[in-house]
Amino acid sequence: MPDNLIRFLTDHFYIPLYLITWIISVIRYKRFYDTPLKYLPMLIIYTFFTEVLGYFIKYYNEFVFFSDGRYAWHNVIIYNIYQIVFFIFFFEVYRKVLQRQSLKKQIRYLSFVCVLSYIINAIVYNPLHQQMTYAHIIGSVMMVYILIIYFREKYLEDTPYPLKFNLMFWLGSGLMIFYTFFPIISIIYLLKLNIGIQIYFRPILLTSIALMYGLIIIGLVIGKRKAFG
């Protein structure tokens, strides 16, 4: 049993990392409870339970969505649903945080396009058994764009509070790291390019996840309410 637990924690270190991040977010909740991030702890614990459920569906026969043995281990539907929830949540957060009305309007349009891309992807490819990779790529590119305009606005903004105390800065930095690599890897996967780096995809993604949540934790720990924005 201890060996199995150690192996699990080694191979899936990001699952306890989500739980740790959630615990810290709850402890520091008073610093952002009245901001656009007030539902962040819910999203983090949703992330945790999604990964736990995905693990059990894949490796334990007691947890299945499909009676057909060929698909008993298929768990992509929970990740497809999770990803669109994740995108819409952060699109809305940045829409509220950004100051310029024109940028807010842009994000409204982007949210609509994101949802539409998932609907179209679900029509073309069965989301119960296939990753909605095309929609994931579109949402990721939009996320990076939104982060760029957010960082640009913060760069031009005259504020007495250092960015290092701004939770949104750390959160955005973490998201930028992950969503810079994720669509590139997804595109290479779709194109089936035999360029000899596929074996590095999982380590790269896991490293980007670790960095993303590490930065979020830093923001939660040192962030100050007055610097939020």
Image: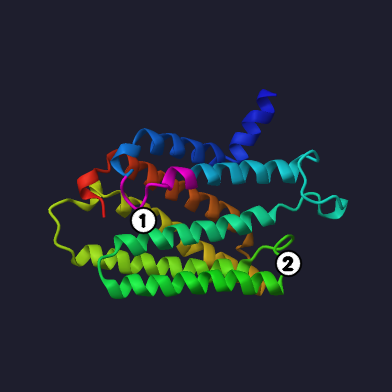
Against 60, residue 134 (above or below) is: below
On screen, residue 159 above or below 55: below
Question: Horizontally, is 183 left or right of 220 in the view?
Answer: right
Give the crowd class for mark 2: few <14, some 14-19, many >=20 residues within 10 Å.
few
Relative image position of residue 64 (x, y in whole percent): 77, 46
Q: Which residues are magenta?
A: 34-43
Categorize mark 1 by other alpha carbons within 10 Å: few (<14), some (14-19), many (20+). Answer: some
Image location (x, y in percent) of residue 38: 37, 47
Residue 48 shows which numbered tag?
A: none
Kindly identify which residue carries mark 2: 126
| Furthest residue toward top | 2
Direction front: furthest residue: 34
Secondary element type, mark 2: loop
Q: Is residue 73 above or below residue 147?
A: above
- Quarter of the image containing the N terminus? top right
Mark 1 residue element: helix
**72 or 67: nearer the viewer:** 67
Total marks in image: 2
Q: Is residue 194 visible?
A: no
Separation of residues labelled 1 and 2 (CA atoms): 33 Å
Residue 173 got which mark?
1
164 vs 148, left or right, is: left
> Relative to 15, is 104 on the left or the right?
left
Q: Residue at x 48, y 61 (%)?
A: 88
Q: Is residue 200 magenta?
A: no
Judge whether residue 223 can be spotted in this image.
yes
Residue type beneath disc 1 = Ser
Q: Main secondary structure of the magenta part?
A: loop
